[in-house]
C-alpha cells in the first residue's frame, strides 16, 4: 500500500502569458516534516506554494491533502483546508493587539460583540503552546520582527493550520531570532504540522529540513534528504543544464576607470560598498533578492539618501543629493519596476522619452519645441526599434519589452557617462531581450560605463565583463570574466566558502 | 432578406454605440450644450445679452481661482485656502488703497497671495505634508487675517479707489472688464499646459511622481509653483471682488474653494492628478454658473438649488467613470 502524504501535488503546470512558470511539477510532503524548497529567483518555488495556498490557480495537475483531492480555489479556501501561509511581508495590522490580530477573522460572537477576556486568554494559551511568552495585549507594531513572525504563525495555527508555508522567514531576522524561529518550527513538527520552508540559506536547510526539493526553471531537479547529500550537490541541482546561447558576441574594449563608488552606506541594506567601472565595461551586480543591489543603485543615483560614501565620476568627486544632480553629472538609472518608476503609462511615447531632456530641447524660454521633440522621438524609435504606432502612442499600449526600450530611450536622448540598469529584461520576451543585450553592447562600445543588476545568472554571465556579487548589503566578491560561472556566483551569493 | 435586416440593425447598433461613446468622451461639452439648450427653452430671458453678462460676471471669481486650482489638482494636490485668500485679498486691496496708489496696492495684494501660496507649496512639496491638511490650515489662517485686517467690518472704497471701482463696472468692447480678465487668465493657463515644459511636467508629476523624479527632474519646484500660482489667482479674484462691490470684505469667498474643485472635477480632472484641461475646467465653471443662473430665473428657492447642484456634480462624475471604464476595455 502506498503511503498517504499530507500534501501531494502531481503534474502541476502553470504559465503566465506563454511562459511556463511551472512545468509538470510533482511535490510531496509527509505529515510532521519540514520540507525545504530551494532554487534561484524565479525558479518556481513561490509559484508552487501560491498555488497550494490558493493565491494562484493551477493550469493543470492535481492537489491532494491527506489523500483527498481538493480544489484550492482561493486563499480563503486554502485556510479552510488547513493551509497557512506566512509571507515575507507580514499581513498583520500594526495598530491592533496581538490577540486581535490572531483572531482577526473570527473576533466576535454571532451578535458581533467581542469577549475580550476570552480572546486574550485563548491567544495567550496558543502562544504558550509553541513555547513563547508574548503578552496578548501588546500592540503588534511595537513588537520586534521576530515576535511579529511568531504572531503570524500563531494566527495560522488559530485557524487550525496543518500545513504551514514559510517564505524566506529568516531574511528579516537576526541570527539569534532565527534560532528561536527554528525552535518554534520543531515544536510544530512535534505537533504533527507539516512545514514547507522556502529559503536561500543552505546552512539553515541542512540544520532543520527533513527533505529538500530543488527547483530549476520551473521544474523539479531533485528531491533529496539533506543527510544524504552535500551543499555542492544541491548547488549543482539548482544550476542544472546550460541555457542556449542568446547572448550576442562582443569584443569589449575596456578603457580607463570612469566611475568609482567608495565605502557607500545607505540604510540597512547598503554596507561599505565600493567598486569601480571602466569605460566600455559592463559590470554586473548579482545577488539574491534583498541583498541590497537595488538599494546600492538608488544610493548612487541619489534616489535614496546616502549615509556615507564618495562617488567619483571622471576623476571628480560628485556631490549627489538627488536624481537631478546625478542626471546632470551624467549618471542614468533604469529602475527595476518600469511601470511604477520608469515610464508614465498614461502619457505618449514622445512625452516619455523626452522627459529627462525636455529642458534641453526647449531652451531657456521653457516653451516646448514640438518639431524638435518629434524628430528626437522618431530617431529614438528607429534606433531602438521600438514597435509602436507612432510618436503619439500611449506607453500603456506598448508591450513590456517596448516599454523597457522607452526607458532606455529616455537616457539615450540625454547625455550620460554611466548607465545603471536594474533588472533590464525582467518580464520581457526573448526577442526583446536580445535586442536589449545588443543595445547594452552598443552603449559600451561607445565608451560608456554600464552597470547591470540582474537576478538571472545566465544573463549576468552572458553579458558582463566582471560581476560583483552582493550578500546582505555587502560586496561578497568580484569575479573576473574568466571566473564567471553560475556556481561561483551562487556560492558567493549564499555565503558558501 | 432576414440577414440583410440583421446587418442594418447591426450597423444601427454600432452607430448608436459610437454616438454614446463620443457623448461620454466629450461629456463636459455635452453637459454644457444640453444645459444651454434646456436653459434657453426654460426661460426666454436666458439668452439675453444682459443675462449672459450677468452670468459671466458672477462666475468670474470662481473662474479665475479654478484655473489655479486646476494646476494644483493636476499635481495630485488640492488647495482649500483659495476662498479665504480671496477674502484676505479683498480686504487688503481696499485697505492698501486708503494709503497707496492703485498699482502699488494691486501688486502688494497679489504678492501676499503668492506668499500664502508659497507657504502651502513649501509645506507640501518640501516638508511633504498632506495638501489637504496644509491648505485647510491656511484656509483658517487667511480668513483670520482677513478679519484682523478689516477689524471685523467691511472697508469701503473711497475717492482713491475710484479707479478700481470703475474697472469693476466698466466694459471693454461691450464686455465687462473683469470677465475679460478671467478669459485672459484662462488663456494663460491654456497656453502653459499646452506649450510649456512647466505644464507638461505638472501633468507628468500628477501621473507618476516617482518616474518624473527618477528622470532627474526636481519635482518640488513644480509643485511649489503650482500652489504659488493658485495663491496669486485667488488674490486677483479677491481684488476683482472689491472692484465689483466697492467694499473690501472678510466674509466673501466662503465655500469658493469647493465650487472651484467642483468645476475642475466636472471638467473631467482626476483628483489623484495627471488628468485635466483648461478648456474643460472653464466649461465646468460655466456649467456650475448656469445651474445657479437658470434656477434663479425660474425662481427656484436657494436651498433646493444646492441639492440640485450637488446632484448634477454626481451625474457628471458618474459619466466620466463610465467613460473611463469603457476606455480601459
Image (spheres, coloured by chain):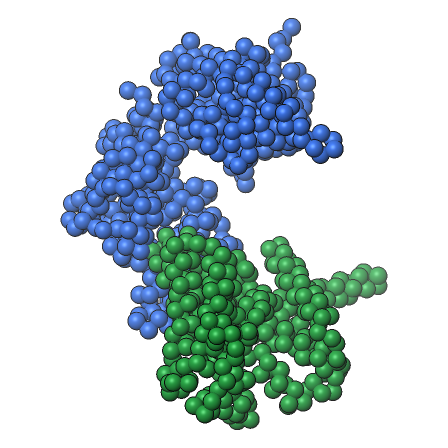
Chain colours: A blue, B green
Is A381 placed above or below A121 here? Answer: below
| A342, A290: nearer the viewer | A290
Residue A382 is drawn in which quadrant? bottom left
What residue is at 21 percent from the left and 50 percent from the top? A318
Q: In this view, does A465 lie to the left or right of B282?
A: left
Is B51 placed above or below B134 here? Answer: below
Quadrant holding the N terminus of chain B:
bottom right
- Hey, which residue is sitting farthest right in the picture? B2
Q: Position of residue A156 (x, y in %)?
A: 58, 24
What residue is at 48 percent from the left and 74 percent from the top? B151
Q: Where is residue A326 in the image (x, y as percent from the top left)?
A: 28, 52
Q: Can residue B244 be seen in this view?
A: yes
Q: Where is residue B235 in the image (x, y as percent from the top left)?
A: 46, 75
Q: Can residue B190 be seen in this view?
A: no
What residue is at 31 percent from the left and 48 percent from the top? A302
| A360, A144: nearer the viewer | A144
Q: Is residue A88 left or right of residue A154?
A: left
Residue B262 is drawn in which quadrant? bottom right
| A99, B221: nearer the viewer | A99
- Hey, which residue is sitting farthest top in the picture? A1
Q: Where is residue B54 in the image (x, y as percent from the top left)?
A: 62, 85
What residue is at 32 percent from the left and 30 percent from the top? A471
Amino acid at each position: 500500500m502506498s503511503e498517504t502524504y499530507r500534501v501531494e501535488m502531481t503534474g502541476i503546470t502553470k504559465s503566465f502569458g506563454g511562459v511556463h512558470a511551472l512545468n509538470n511539477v510533482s511535490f510531496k510532503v509527509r505529515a510532521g516534516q519540514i520540507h525545504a524548497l530551494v532554487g534561484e529567483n524565479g525558479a518556481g518555488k513561490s509559484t508552487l506554494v501560491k498555488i497550494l495556498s490558493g493565491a494562484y490557480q493551477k493550469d493543470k495537475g492535481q492537489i491532494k491533502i491527506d489523500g483527498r483531492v481538493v480544489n484550492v480555489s482561493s486563499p480563503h479556501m486554502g485556510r479552510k483546508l488547513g493551509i497557512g501561509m506566512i509571507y515575507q511581508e507580514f499581513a498583520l495590522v500594526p495598530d491592533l493587539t496581538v490577540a486581535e490580530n490572531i483572531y482577526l477573522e473570527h473576533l466576535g460572537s454571532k451578535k458581533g460583540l467581542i469577549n475580550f477576556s476570552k480572546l486574550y486568554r485563548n491567544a495567550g494559551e496558543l502562544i504558550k503552546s509553541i513555547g513563547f511568552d508574548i503578552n496578548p495585549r501588546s500592540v503588534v507594531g511595537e513588537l520586534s520582527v521576530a515576535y511579529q513572525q511568531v504572531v503570524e504563525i500563531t494566527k495560522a495555527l488559530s485557524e487550525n493550520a496543518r500545513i504551514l508555508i514559510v517564505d524566506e522567514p529568516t531574511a528579516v531576522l537576526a541570527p539569534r531570532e532565527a534560532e528561536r524561529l527554528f525552535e518554534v518550527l520543531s515544536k510544530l513538527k512535534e505537533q504533527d504540522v507539516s512545514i514547507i520552508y522556502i529559503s536561500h540559506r543552505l546552512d539553515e536547510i541542512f540544520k532543520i529540513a527533513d527533505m529538500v526539493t530543488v527547483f530549476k526553471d520551473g521544474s523539479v531537479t531533485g528531491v533529496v534528504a539533506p543527510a544524504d547529500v552535500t551543499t555542492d550537490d544541491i548547488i549543482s541541482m539548482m544550476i542544472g543544464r546550460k541555457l542556449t546561447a542568446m547572448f550576442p558576441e562582443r569584443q569589449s574594449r575596456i578603457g580607463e576607470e570612469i566611475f568609482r563608488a567608495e565605502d557607500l552606506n545607505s540604510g540597512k541594506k547598503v554596507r561599505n560598498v565600493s567598486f569601480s567601472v571602466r569605460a566600455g565595461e559592463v559590470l554586473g551586480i548579482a545577488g539574491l533578492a534583498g541583498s541590497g543591489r537595488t538599494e546600492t543603485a538608488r544610493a548612487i543615483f541619489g534616489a535614496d539618501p546616502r549615509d556615507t560614501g564618495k562617488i567619483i565620476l571622471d576623476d571628480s568627486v560628485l556631490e549627489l543629493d538627488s536624481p537631478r544632480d546625478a542626471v546632470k553629472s551624467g549618471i542614468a538609472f533604469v529602475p527595476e519596476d518600469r511601470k511604477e518608476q520608469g515610464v508614465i503609462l498614461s502619457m505618449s511615447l514622445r512625452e516619455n522619452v523626452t522627459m529627462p531632456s525636455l529642458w534641453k530641447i526647449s531652451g531657456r524660454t521653457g516653451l516646448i519645441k514640438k518639431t524638435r521633440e518629434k524628430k528626437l522621438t522618431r530617431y529614438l524609435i528607429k534606433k531602438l526599434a521600438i514597435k509602436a504606432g507612432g510618436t503619439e502612442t500611449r506607453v500603456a499600449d506598448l508591450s513590456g519589452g517596448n516599454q523597457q526600450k522607452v526607458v532606455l530611450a529616455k537616457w539615450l536622448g540625454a547625455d550620460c557617462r554611466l548607465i545603471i540598469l536594474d533588472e533590464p529584461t525582467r518580464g520581457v520576451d526573448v526577442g526583446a531581450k536580445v535586442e536589449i543585450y545588443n543595445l547594452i553592447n552598443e552603449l559600451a562600445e561607445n565608451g560608456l560605463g554600464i552597470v547591470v543588476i540582474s537576478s538571472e545568472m545566465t544573463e549576468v554571465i552572458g553579458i558582463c565583463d566582471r560581476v560583483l556579487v552582493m550578500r546582505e548589503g555587502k560586496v561578497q566578491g568580484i569575479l573576473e570574466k574568466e571566473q564567471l560561472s553560475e556556481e561561483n556566483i551562487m556560492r558567493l551569493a549564499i555565503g558558501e566558502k | 432578406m432576414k440577414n440583410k435586416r440583421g446587418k442594418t440593425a447591426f450597423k444601427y447598433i454600432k452607430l448608436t454605440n459610437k454616438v454614446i461613446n463620443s457623448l461620454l468622451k466629450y461629456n463636459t461639452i455635452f453637459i454644457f450644450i444640453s444645459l444651454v439648450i434646456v436653459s434657453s427653452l426654460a426661460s426666454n430671458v436666458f439668452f439675453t445679452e444682459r443675462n449672459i453678462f450677468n452670468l459671466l460676471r458672477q462666475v468670474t471669481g470662481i473662474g479665475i481661482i479654478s484655473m489655479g486650482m486646476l494646476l494644483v489638482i493636476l499635481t495630485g494636490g488640492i488647495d482649500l485656502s483659495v476662498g479665504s485668500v480671496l477674502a484676505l485679498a479683498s480686504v487688503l486691496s481696499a485697505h492698501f488703497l486708503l494709503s497707496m496708489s492703485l498699482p502699488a496696492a494691486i501688486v502688494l495684494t497679489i504678492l501676499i497671495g503668492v506668499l500664502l501660496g508659497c507657504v502651502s507649496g513649501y509645506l507640501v512639496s518640501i516638508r511633504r505634508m498632506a495638501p489637504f491638511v496644509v491648505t485647510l490650515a491656511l484656509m483658517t489662517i487667511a480668513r483670520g487675517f482677513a478679519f484682523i485686517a478689516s477689524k471685523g467690518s467691511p472697508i469701503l472704497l473711497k475717492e482713491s479707489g475710484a479707479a478700481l471701482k470703475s474697472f469693476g463696472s466698466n466694459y471693454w468692447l461691450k464686455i465687462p472688464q473683469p470677465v475679460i480678465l478671467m478669459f485672459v487668465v484662462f488663456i494663460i493657463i491654456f497656453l502653459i499646459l499646452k506649450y510649456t515644459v512647466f505644464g507638461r511636467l505638472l501633468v507628468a508629476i500628477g501621473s507618476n511622481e516617482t518616474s518624473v523624479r527618477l528622470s532627474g527632474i526636481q519635482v518640488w519646484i513644480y509643485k511649489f509653483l503650482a500652489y504659488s500660482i493658485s495663491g496669486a489667482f485667488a488674490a486677483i479674484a479677491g481684488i476683482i471682488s472689491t472692484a465689483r462691490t466697492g467694499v473690501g470684505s472678510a466674509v466673501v469667498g466662503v465655500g469658493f474653494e469647493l465650487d472651484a474643485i467642483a468645476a475642475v472635477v466636472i471638467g473631467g480632472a482626476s483628483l489623484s492628478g495627471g488628468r485635466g484641461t483648461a478648456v474643460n475646467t472653464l466649461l465646468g465653471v460655466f456649467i456650475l454658473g448656469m445651474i445657479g443662473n437658470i434656477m434663479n430665473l425660474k425662481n427656484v428657492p436657494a436651498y433646493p438649488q444646492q441639492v440640485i447642484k450637488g446632484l448634477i456634480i454626481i451625474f457628471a462624475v458618474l459619466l466620466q467613470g463610465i467613460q473611463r471604464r469603457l476606455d480601459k476595455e
